[in-house]
Image (cartoon, helix red, strand yellow):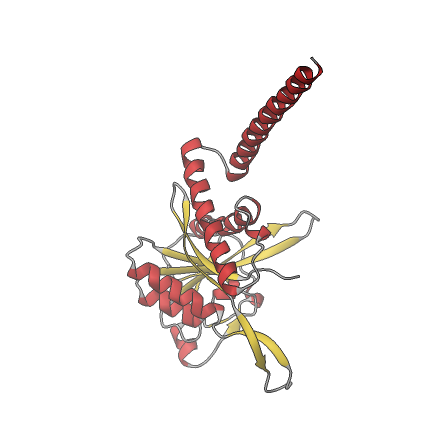
C-alpha cells in the first residue's frame, strides 16, 4: 500500500494538544552494499528527525517537562539528548533491554536483560543502561487484550523520583498522538490526498495539520470531540444543500406552470 510516512511532535497540556513540527520521510533509491540490490531508504533517519524536533522545541522555549515516545525512539542517543536539554524522557522499552542493577555492575560490564527480572506491577526498579550516565527508573504493567490474553508494557523514565502510578498515568498521555493521527486521516482529509510529488504531499500534509489545529480550537470552545464536530458540519452542509435543492425544484415547477399557461 502506498501512503505518506512522516514524523511529528505533539505538544500536550491539561487543556488540549497542538502539533509543533513535522517532517515527511522521503525515501530515495539506494544500493545495498551487502545484497547489491536497489532499495528505497530515507537519507535521514527517524531518530535524527526526532532529535531535531525536540531540540527545536527547546530552542523555541516551549515549556515542557517530559518527552514521551514509544519503544522505537528509546535509545541512549535520544535519552542523552533529552537529558542534555534539562528535560526528562519517558518511553516504552522492549523486553530484551539490558540493564545494570548498580554502578558497580555497570563499571564491570555486568548487564542483564529485564525480561527475567519479572517486574511486578507496582514496583519501580532503579537501574543503569549502556551509554547513559544517569540512573533510570524501569517499571512494568500487565495489559489485558480483547481475546483474553495479556500483554506486558515496560516503561523507562529518566525521572527516578516518579512513583509507579504517576509513571503509568504520564505515559498514557502519549496515546494523544495516536488520536491526533486518526483525526488527521479521518477528519482533516489527510488520507484523501491527490498529491503525487514530495512537495505537493508536504503541502497537503501541512494543510491537514492546519485543519486539525482549527478543529482542536473548536473542540475546546464547544467541549466536544473532532468526530462530533465533523458530524455537525456535515449535517449543516446537507441541510443547506437540501434547502437549495428544494428551492431549485420549486423554481422548476413554477417555470413549467408558467410555460403551460
Return the residue nearer the eye: 90 or 256.
256
Give the residue displayed 34% in from the left and 54% down from the top: 64
Q: Give the number of callouts.
A: 0
- Check the image and report above or below for 3 versus 16: below
Q: Is residue 254 left or right of residue 83?
A: right
**Residue 14 appears in the figure:** yes
Tell which residue pokes out farthest to the top in this image. Answer: 261
From the viewer's side, name the closer residue of 58 and 212. Answer: 212
Nearer to me, 142 or 241: 241
| Quarter occupied by the C terminus | top right
Q: Please, is residue 145 above or below residue 229 in the view?
A: below
Asked where in the image residue 249 lies, by quadrant, the reply is top right
Judge by depth and name the residue closer to the eye, 36 or 57: 36
221 left or right of 118? left
In percent of width and height, residue 66 lies at 38, 56
Quarter in which the N terminus is drawn: bottom right
Residue at the image position 50 percent from the left and 37 percent from the top: 225
Q: Give how far across and how far down residue 128 sits, in percent.
A: 42, 70
Residue 36, given in percent of the width and then of the height, sits at 63, 86
- The residue depicted at 67 percent of the width and 19 percent of the height is 253
Snapshot quadrant of residue 125: bottom left
Task: Tell me if residue 255 comes above or below residue 183 in the rendering.
Answer: above
Q: Can see residue 101? A: no
Q: Position of residue 257 (x, y in %)?
A: 68, 15
Q: Quadrant of residue 52?
A: bottom left
Amino acid at each position: 500500500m502506498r501512503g505518506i510516512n512522516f514524523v511529528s511532535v505533539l505538544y500536550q497540556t491539561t487543556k488540549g494538544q497542538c502539533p509543533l513540527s513535522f517532517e515527511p520521510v522521503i525515501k530515495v533509491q539506494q544500493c545495498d552494499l551487502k545484497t547489491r540490490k536497489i532499495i528505497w531508504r530515507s537519507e535521514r533517519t527517524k531518530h535524527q528527525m526526532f532529535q531535531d524536533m525536540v531540540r527545536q522545541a527547546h530552542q523555541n522555549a516551549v515549556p515542557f517537562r517530559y518527552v514521551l515516545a514509544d519503544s522505537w525512539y528509546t535509545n541512549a542517543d535520544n535519552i542523552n539528548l533529552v537529558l542534555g536539554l534539562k528535560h526528562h524522557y519517558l518511553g516504552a522499552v522492549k523486553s530484551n533491554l539490558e540493564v545494570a542493577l548498580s554502578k558497580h555492575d555497570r563499571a564491570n560490564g555486568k548487564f542483564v536483560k529485564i525480561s527475567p527480572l519479572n517486574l511486578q506491577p507496582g514496583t519501580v526498579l532503579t537501574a543503569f543502561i549502556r551509554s547513559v550516565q544517569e540512573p533510570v527508573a524501569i517499571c512494568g504493567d500487565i495489559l489485558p487484550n480483547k481475546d483474553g490474553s495479556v500483554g506486558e508494557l515496560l516503561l523507562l523514565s529518566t525521572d527516578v523520583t516518579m512513583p509507579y502510578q504517576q509513571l503509568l498515568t504520564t505515559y498514557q498521555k502519549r496515546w494523544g498522538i495516536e488520536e491526533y493521527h486518526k483525526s488527521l486521516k479521518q477528519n482533516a482529509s489527510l488520507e484523501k490526498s491527490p498529491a503525487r510529488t514530495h512537495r505537493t504531499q508536504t503541502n497537503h500534509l501541512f494543510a491537514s495539520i492546519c485543519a486539525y489545529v482549527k478543529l482542536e480550537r473548536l473542540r475546546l470552545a464547544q467541549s466536544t470531540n473532532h468526530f462530533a464536530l465533523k458530524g455537525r458540519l456535515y449535517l449543516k452542509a446537507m441541510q443547506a444543500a437540501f434547502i437549495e435543492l428544494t428551492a431549485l425544484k420549486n423554481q422548476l415547477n413554477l417555470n413549467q406552470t408558467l410555460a403551460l399557461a
